[in-house]
Image (cartoon, rainbow, N blue to C red):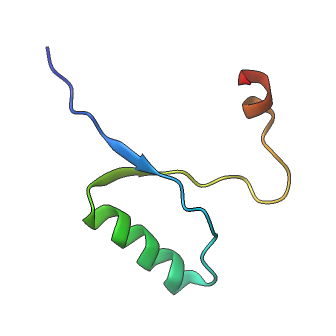
């Protein structure tokens, strides 16, 4: 059994505005990325601290 390997991307700087965010996502999709990480704004999620 084989499964498809997918790459992800984590934008370093948040894009300002809806059009800029959409352009960032489209660029990542065009480069073959299948996943985009979107961190919680403000405070860190509790699960990241538990995993570390």
In percent of width and height, residue 25 lies at 42, 68
> Vertical placement of 1 versus 35: above or below?
above
Q: Residue at x 35, y 71 (%)?
A: 27
Q: Residue furthest right?
A: 43
In percent of width and height, residue 52 lies at 74, 24
* Number of numbered discs overlaid on the protein picture: 0
In percent of width and height, residue 20 lies at 52, 83
Picture quarter containing residue 50?
A: top right
Picture quarter containing residue 7?
A: top left
Q: Is residue 29 left or right of residue 1?
A: right
> Vertical placement of 9 versus 49: above or below?
below
> Vertical placement of 9 versus 17: above or below?
above
In percent of width and height, residue 6 lies at 30, 40
Q: Residue furthest front?
A: 12
Q: Quadrant of the N terminus?
A: top left
Q: Is residue 23 left or right of residue 18?
A: left
Q: Residue furthest top?
A: 1
Q: Residue at x 79, y 30 (%)?
A: 49
């Amino acid at each position: 059994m084989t499964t498809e390997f997918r790459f992800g991307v984590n934008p370093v700087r948040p894009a300002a505005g809806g059009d800029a965010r959409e352009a960032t996502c489209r660029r990542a999709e065009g480069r073959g990325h299948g996943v985009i990480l979107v961190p919680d704004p403000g405070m860190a999620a509790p699960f990241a601290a538990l995993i570390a």
